[in-house]
Image: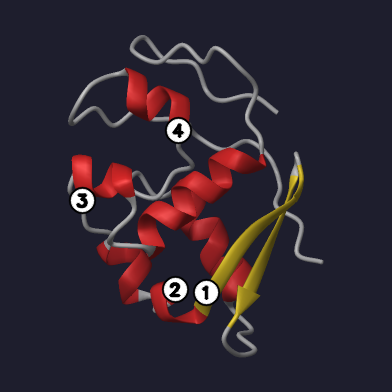
Amino acid sequence: MKFQTTSFFKPTRDFNADDVLFTFNRMLDPNQPFRKAYPASFPYFTDMGLNKLITKVEAVDPYTVKFTLKEINAPFIQNMARICIHPVGRIRSATAESGQGFGHQPVSAWHGSVYFP
């Protein structure tokens, strides 16, 4: 899978599960190091209650991510689709985030699927 290329973001590698982990851990954990370095809030994510619903995000393999939820939630997959297309919630490349300077928000869209085993 590929990240979207823009005039200000040229990916140097393919998209993988680590990028999903980086993105969701950043939204879930207020003590996540990048979130401390680049303070941000995620109102869309929290307004949907995803910060309280998701208890764990883990990589099963390089292209598969498993979400563990606190409880059964019928609209979870629909909400995940919304998060991945919302400008603030798009999947981020940890490499790109750390290498493009403080305050930079690359518009790296996610063109793929997450599997929910």
Between residues 24 and 81, which one lies in front from this camera angle?
24
Pointer 4 or 2: first along the chain: 2
- For disc 2, the neighbor class at 10 Å (few under 14, some 14 to 19, many from 20) is many
Pointer 1 or 3: first along the chain: 3
Pointer 3 or 4: first along the chain: 3
Residue type highlighted by circle 3: Ala
Quadrant occupied by the N terminus: top right
- For disc 4, the neighbor class at 10 Å (few under 14, some 14 to 19, many from 20) is some
Give the label on residue 108, or none: none
Residue position for label 1: 54
- For disc 3, the neighbor class at 10 Å (few under 14, some 14 to 19, many from 20) is some
Quadrant occupied by the C terminus: bottom right
Secondary structure under tag 1 reads strand
Residue position for label 2: 50
Residue type highlighted by circle 4: Ala
Residue position for label 3: 40
Residue position for label 4: 94
- Residue occupying image coordinates x 65% and y 89%: 72
Mark nearest the camera among 4 and 2 is 4
Q: Are marks 1 and 2 in contact (CB under 8 Å)?
A: yes
Q: CA distance from mark 4 to mark 2?
A: 21 Å
Q: Quadrant of residue 111?
A: top right
List x then y, in percent, for residue 18.
60, 40
Residue type highlighted by circle 2: Leu
Between residues 106 and 31, which one lies in front from this camera angle?
31
Between residues 30 and 110, which one lies in front from this camera angle?
30
List x then y, in percent, for residue 95.
45, 25
Q: CA distance from mark 3 to mark 4?
A: 15 Å
Indicate whether 34 appears above or below 77: above
- Residue occupying image coordinates x 17% and y 48%: 39
Mark nearest the camera among 1 and 2 is 1
Q: Are marks 1 and 3 in contact (CB under 8 Å)?
A: no
